[in-house]
Amino acid sequence: MARQRKWPRTSARSAISALPPSISTSKNLPRLNRSNASPASSKTSGHWSNPQEDLQMIYEMRTYTFAQGKLPVYLKLAETVGRPVRGNDYGINHGYWVAEFGQLNQVWHLWSYDSHAQRDELRAALSRNERWTNEYIPNIRGMLLRQDIRFLNMLNGPNKPTGEGNVYELRIYRTHVGQAGPWANMFKEAFVTREKYSKNVFLATGEAPQPNEVLHMWSYPDVNIRAATRARLAQNPDWQAFVSKGANTIVDMHSTLLLPTNYSSMK
């Protein structure tokens, strides 16, 4: 697809320089199931993915909110210390994004682990890493206002988009109690229609702390194509039928437009 006008760079994006080539490799850590959780997954978005062998895997979306003016400082710290120290040795990182629209001064990053037990082991091992405890943690505390963690039940993906320079939209829907799963199943039936317009990065239901959430992320070449795509989708009769069917299930809807950092595995 031909690119439309390129989405302008932001101050947050311009604050990110190239990731150093050296990534630490930690020894004697619990083995990660890289075959299932690789950030460079070759899954095809058009195929619904929820293999049985992934059922025990957990996905964690972490959201950090920073004091005004501190986001570029954090991005540099993550570039030079955080990501080189962690690599994929303490959990698999699937993407690292900065919020452009929605709540500002936020970073979102998605991780996976083979199990809750493995996550506990790897987090404990990370807490013993001297560079992490001496160079990263003390420096982040003074600029971080809050941390939010969501544990997710992954229903589709994560699927890595092709190419670079994409923008990502994360949509979070809150449903009535007990309706997140049923709504996600309805969405599954409409997936073929929805993916005619743009590719799904992931679809998940919330496990904790909010079990009545559905999260789905989509990639677009730029924000203008996103707007045009959403307008065309809204005219599709099959999509209109799905929206009407699930309207009474949703309590509220939230959308955040995300830009990938240059050390994100999804660009």
Image: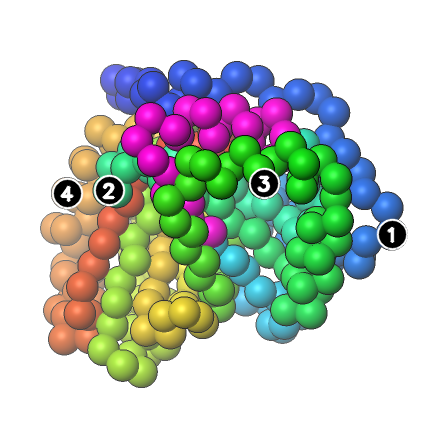
Percent position of residue 264, x then y: 53, 34
Q: What stretch is highlighted in magenta?
A: 62-83
Q: In this view, does 247 lie above or below 89?
A: below
Q: Earlier in the sequence, mark 3 or mark 1?
A: 1
Q: Which of marks 3 and 4 is nearer the N terminus?
A: 3
Give residue 28's mark. Answer: 1
Q: Quadrant of residue 129?
A: top right
Q: Nearer the viewer, residue 107 or 171?
A: 107
Specify whether residue 44 is in view.
no
Quarter that holds the N terminus: top left
Residue in the picture at 22% in, 29% down: 224
Q: Which amino acid does label 4 sit on?
A: Ala
Q: Earlier in the sequence, mark 1 or mark 4?
A: 1
Q: Which amino acid does label 2 sit on?
A: Gly
How many numbered discs?
4
**Direction from residue 240 to residue 100 in the image, left or right:** right
Q: Which amino acid does label 1 sit on?
A: Asn
User: Would you name the residue on which mark 2 appears?
Assistant: 102
Give residue 137's mark. Answer: 3
Give residue 83's mark. Answer: none
Q: Is mark 2 on a helix, strand or loop?
A: loop
User: Would you name the residue on which mark 4 appears?
Assistant: 231
